[in-house]
């Protein structure tokens, strides 16, 4: 039933979660600016990425057989643009002197006049914007040619799902593919229509204007971004405070250059990458009711950790494309292995989230009376709604995740569930999910306490 349900609901998400757009309020995203000659040199010493090179394209997730997962999901890899098409947008972290994150940010780089003055428009989470603004001013020192400002009142941030074609932006807009992950789609910045980048319109007017541009192709989809970025394991703003970039997956999100020169907080980041062991990472978590049938990706991952490839049945091997007659057979000692944790395609994850939230119902059994079907549907929706509300009430930030098997803390929630779902972000101990070896294995029937 679950596979049929995912197939039925996956269509609504389509390629890269279907088509849609979203506009962020000023409370969610703010725009800071750094402009003037020397702006690149100034920021180069404060960010983890390399501003003297083009940013890399979004990293393609690959399965164990080296096939891009997006191709397995029906997304043509040619849709992912090359560096030149995204050369204006960088993903970065700002660190304190101890190497801990102040905030993450997206940096738009552009020339603003013939004298080659540079400007960076910094798209930053609203809850960390004031701290970043103070951080920038603290390290400005005597660079009088560099000016720092807040453009939030005259610019707006949008995102578009279902396309990675970022060329041909209309006047007053700049667009680029989100460099962190393909599922995040295209990032759009409304910069106003005049030469001074100042707009007389309000945020509401800019929202309405962008919606009219998108209406025929990309309908409004408020809240989608929050779900997608959590399913991709991406924390933002104050969710990252006092954590290291590698603990927060920024080595996978094109946010860190290990080849650039010195920058604030570099020592801990480089040492951890080259000589250290990352013992905890932020991971996406989908909390499932203990009464729910365990989804197949959970079953396969559990069997892999417990028994290796020999523990998989023929159905699982077929799904993972393991050919035992292949000359290059994948064995237990091979460096190539299927993922040791559940891996869901975008449509699969979307279907599961929809089912858990009660917005999509399980397929009814054939031969059941219509009255009985309606009764079962209502009961399913009511139970799903209660479960989502329960998780939302107890799974707050900094809540511990405790394994009931031994009573030990295995993680801490860093971002509460996306509204209407049980999808959250937690900083998990790598050894307790079977990714650092040892006796601890990830189990399909793990039971946890939250609080």
Image: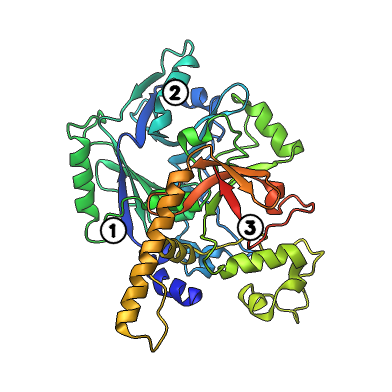
The residue at the point 75 percent across, 53 percent down is: 440
In the rendered structure, are the residues bearing label 1 and label 3 in contact, judged by CB atoms less than 8 Å apart? no
Dot 2 alpha-carbon crowd within 10 angstroms: few under 14, some 14 to 19, many 20 or more: few
Residue under circle 3? 446
- Which image quarter is the C terminus in? top right
Residue 307 x/y as whole percent = 76, 67
> Is residue 306 toward the left or the right of residue 10 in the image?
right
Q: Could you say which is closer to the camera, residue 382 or residue 430?
A: 382
The residue at the point 59 percent across, 47 percent down is: 252
**SS state under label 3:** loop
**Would you say residue 185 is visible in this rendering?**
no
In the rendered structure, are the residues bearing label 2 and label 1 in contact, judged by CB atoms less than 8 Å apart? no
Residue under circle 2? 131
Residue 183 x/y as whole percent = 46, 55
Between disc 2 and disc 1, whose residue precedes?
A: 2
**SS state under label 2:** helix
The residue at the point 19 percent across, 46 percent down is: 209
**In the figure, 151 relative to 203: above or below?**
above
Q: Which mark is residue 218?
A: 1
- Look at discs 1 and 3 and give the one toward the viewer: 3
- Look at discs 3 and 2 and give the one toward the viewer: 3
């Amino acid at each position: 039933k679950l596979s049929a349900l995912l197939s039925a609901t996956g269509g609504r998400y389509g390629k890269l979660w279907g088509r849609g757009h979203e506009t962020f309020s000023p409370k969610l995203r703010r725009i800071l600016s750094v402009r003037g000659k020397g702006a690149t040199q100034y920021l180069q010493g404060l960010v983890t990425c390399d501003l003297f090179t083009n940013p890399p394209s979004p990293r393609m997730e690959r399965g164990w057989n080296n096939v891009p997962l997006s191709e397995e999901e029906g997304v043509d890899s040619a849709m992912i643009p090359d560096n030149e098409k995204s050369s204006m947008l960088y993903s970065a972290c700002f660190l304190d002197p101890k190497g801990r994150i102040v905030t993450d940010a997206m940096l738009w780089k552009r020339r603003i006049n013939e004298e080659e003055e540079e400007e960076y428009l910094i798209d930053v989470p609203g809850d960390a914007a004031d701290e970043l603004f103070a951080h920038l001013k603290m390290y400005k020192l005597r660079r009088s040619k560099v000016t720092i400002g807040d453009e939030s009142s005259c610019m707006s941030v949008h995102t578009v799902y279902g396309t990675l074609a970022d060329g041909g932006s209309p006047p007053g807009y700049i667009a680029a593919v989100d460099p962190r992950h393909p599922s995040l789609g295209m990032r759009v910045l409304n910069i106003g229509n005049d030469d001074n980048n100042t707009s007389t319109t309000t945020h509401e007017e800019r929202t309405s204007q962008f919606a009219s541009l998108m209406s025929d192709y990309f309908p409004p989809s408020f809240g989608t971004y929050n779900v997608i970025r959590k399913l991709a394991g991406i924390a933002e703003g104050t969710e990252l405070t006092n954590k290291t970039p590698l603990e927060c997956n920024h080595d996978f999100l094109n946010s860190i250059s290990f080849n650039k020169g010195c920058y604030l907080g570099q020592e801990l980041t480089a040492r951890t990458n080259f000589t250290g062991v990352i013992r905890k990472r932020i991971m996406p978590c989908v909390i499932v009711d203990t009464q729910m049938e365990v989804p197949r990706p959970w079953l396969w991952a559990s069997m892999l950790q417990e028994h290796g490839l020999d523990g998989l049945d023929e159905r699982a091997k077929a799904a993972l494309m393991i050919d035992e007659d292949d000359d290059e057979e994948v064995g237990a000692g091979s460096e190539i292995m299927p993922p040791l944790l559940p891996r869901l395609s975008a449509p699969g994850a979307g279907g599961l989230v929809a089912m858990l939230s009660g917005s999509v119902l399980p397929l009814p059994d054939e031969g059941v009376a219509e009255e009985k079907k309606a009764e079962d549907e209502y009961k399913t929706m009511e139970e799903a709604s209660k479960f989502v509300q329960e998780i939302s009430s107890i799974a707050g930030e900094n809540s511990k995740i405790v394994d009931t098997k031994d009573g030990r803390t295995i993680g801490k929630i860093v971002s509460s569930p996306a509204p209407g779902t049980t999808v959250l972000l937690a900083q998990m101990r790598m050894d307790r999910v079977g990714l650092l070896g040892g006796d601890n294995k990830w189990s399909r029937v793990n039971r946890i306490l939250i609080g």
